[in-house]
Image (cartoon, helix red, strand yellow):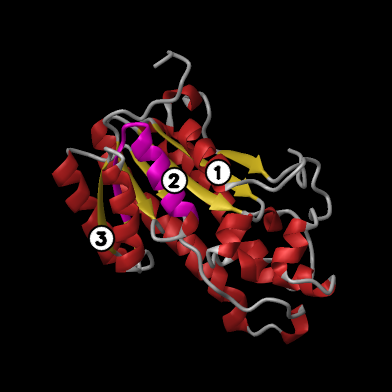
């Protein structure tokens, strides 16, 4: 392999939300680059399918049903993985949640507002808390997360989701400073809607539903019609998101930490 190509050979990677489209794509990509992958999620069948794909392609993968919002379960899983694999090098969190959208502030209940904030930030916080000690013992590591452009774009119906994504990005930034002493890097991929993931039932379909309804379209029709503000030919694909995660997890990105990496097609430029 050329020296400038990303490689995750013999790295141990934990993928939370691995039963979903995004997490599954990243798990497969990490395994193709040589990582030993431990995937978690809520669906036995979907996790088994990811493991089967990886092992049939010659990779190494194991799966476990883990509630990413359960602190004890997350700590226990990380300890079990570290004991089995000799440590943890990489973590990717793709945990999402269906939540109420499309309501203005005056009609939004406190519970509906806090649902995405609680789920997104809690899952990412617990991922970092669980894996960081094992990465530190290993001499370093990389913790990756995912957000959406809603963190920066105002619009009716997105309040809870927007604050949740801003929180996930804030975690990536601030943990970079705290974990630098342990040679642990962080990054967050800010991705626009991925049509393949929406078609597979991703929560991102719900996130973009208010905008589609305002246009009188389905989410699929809106995404196919090139969303407003997109500066490139098409929305990102699962392969592109997974490839971005591979790069960020690899030694090629060792000068990057606390980065929010835009995969937004130019909707946000920074």
Disc number at residue 26? 2
Q: Which residues are magenta?
A: 22-39
Disc number at residue 241? 1
Q: Residue furthest left?
A: 84
Q: Quadrant of the N terminus?
A: top left
Disc number at residue 267? none
Measured Cα–Cα span from mark 1 to mark 3: 23 Å
Residue corresponding to mark 3: 64
The residue positioned 56% from the left and 67% from the top of the image is 203
Residue 248 appears at what percent x and percent y?
Answer: 49, 33
Q: In the rendered image of this protein, does residue 48 appear above or below residue 70?
A: above
Left/right placement of residue 212 relative to residue 123 reads right
Measured Cα–Cα span from mark 3 to mark 2: 16 Å
Residue 93 visible in rendering: no
The stretch drawn in magenta includes residue 156: no
Left/right placement of residue 125 relative to residue 150 reads left
Residue 219 appears at what percent x and percent y?
Answer: 71, 67
């Amino acid at each position: 392999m050329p020296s400038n190509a990303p490689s995750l050979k013999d790295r141990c990677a934990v993928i939370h939300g691995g039963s979903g489209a995004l997490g599954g794509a990243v798990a497969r990509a990490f395994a193709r680059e040589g990582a030993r992958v431990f995937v978690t999620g809520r669906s036995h069948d979907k996790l088994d399918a990811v493991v089967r794909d990886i092992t049939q392609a010659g990779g190494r993968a194991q799966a476990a049903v883990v509630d990413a919002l359960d602190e004890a379960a997350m700590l226990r899983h990380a300890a079990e993985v570290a004991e089995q694999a000799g440590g943890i090098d990489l973590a990717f969190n793709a945990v999402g949640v269906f939540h109420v959208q499309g309501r203005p502030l005056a009609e939004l209940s406190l519970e509906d507002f806090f649902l995405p904030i609680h789920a997104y930030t809690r899952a990412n916080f617990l991922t970092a808390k669980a894996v960081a000690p094992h990465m530190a013992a290993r001499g370093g590591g990389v913790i990756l997360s995912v957000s959406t452009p809603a963190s920066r774009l105002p619009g009716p119906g997105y309040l809870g989701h927007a604050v949740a994504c801003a929180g996930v990005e804030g975690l990536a930034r601030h943990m970079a400073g705290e974990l630098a002493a342990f040679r642990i890097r962080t990054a967050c991929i800010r991705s626009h809607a991925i049509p393949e993931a929406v078609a597979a039932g991703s929560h991102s379909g719900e996130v973009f539903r208010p905008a589609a309804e305002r246009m009188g379209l389905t989410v699929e029709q809106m995404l196919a019609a090139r969303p407003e503000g997109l500066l490139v030919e098409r929305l990102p694909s699962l392969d592109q998101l997974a490839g971005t995660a591979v790069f960020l997890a690899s030694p090629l990105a060792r000068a990057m930490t606390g980065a929010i990496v835009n995969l937004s097609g130019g909707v946000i430029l920074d």
